[in-house]
Amino acid sequence: AQRVTQPEKLLSVFKGAPVELKCNYSYSGSPELFWYVQYSRQRLQLLLRHISRESIKGFTADLNKGETSFHLKKPFAQEEDSAMYYCALNSGGSNYKLTFGKGTLLTVNP
Amino acid sequence: SAVISQKPSRDICQRGTSLTIQCQVDSQVTMMFWYRQQPGQSLTLIATANQGSEATYESGFVIDKFPISRPNLTFSTLTVSNMSPEDSSIYLCSCMGTGNWGSVFGPGTRLTVL
């Protein structure tokens, strides 16, 4: 069965510091991975998908199949990055059934 | 990308009653999804709702407890039946974004069962 693990429930950094939110997955098929973000009082929204390999709001994430990881990174954190971040795995192919990790609450301090 | 609205945004219900949550998408979508987020937990997929066919439920979820309707390509309902305090959760509706970019989520319905 598929599983997504985000080992850190809380992560606190200072503005300008690098940030890395960890995500590991377990899946027997070819994984399709996403990062979703939920800012305070806003709905869950897509941040990144591994297939697109692009940078959104300065965040990047690389799929490492050998380590079964999809860590989210940003070199210089901003206060507006404070939010809940969820890593998710699509295990349903074109049906897009997402398995979510438990989330990491990122706080960027001034 | 598609925009999803949900009603109600929150409700407080008595044990043993049922609540129907509505999900409206501003464009036609083939598949809609219902998720649950229990307090302090992650999102868990309840079922996939395709228009014109019965919903497909994930392990641990059954139609008698969570009946779903999908009358057209822009609308779906999820009913939480015979509620107990353990059903207190946020229920989210979702669909695919434009160009299969990824899932789009509604604002959620926060349900508290007393």
Image: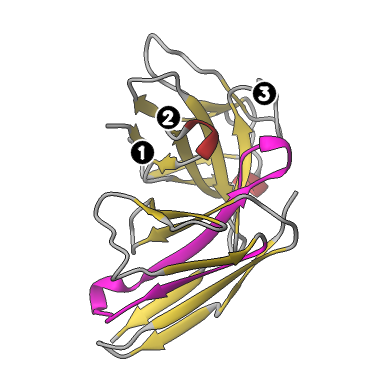
Q: Nearer the viewer, mark 2 or mark 3?
A: 3
Q: Which portion, as a residue range, is magenta?
A: B74-103
- Residue at 42% x, 12% y: name it: A65
Front of the two marks 3 and 1:
3
Provide the chain ID for the residue under circle 3: A
Q: Residue at x 42, y 33 (%)?
A: A91
Res. A110 in view: no
**Residue carrying label 2:** A22
Residues under numbered marks 2 and 1 in contact, where contact means CB atoms less than 8 Å apart:
yes
Check disc 2 and give the amino acid type.
Lys
The residue indicated by pointer 3 is A52
Q: Are marks 2 and 1 on the same chain?
A: yes
Q: Secondary structure at mark 1?
A: loop
Please give the name of the residue rendered at 29% of the width and 70% of the height, measured from the top-left corner.
B64
| Three-letter code, disc 1 | Glu
Left or right: B108 in relation to A75: left
Q: CA distance from mark 2 to mark 1?
A: 7 Å
Residue A68: image quadrant is: top left
From the viewer's side, name the closer residue of B45 and B29: B29
Residue at disc 2, secondary structure: loop
Q: Residue at point 28% right, 62% down?
A: B62
| Of callouts 2 and 1, the N-terminal one | 1
x then y, percent, for residue A101:
38, 41
B57 in relation to A71, above or below: below
Query: Can residue B27 be seen in this snapshot?
Result: yes
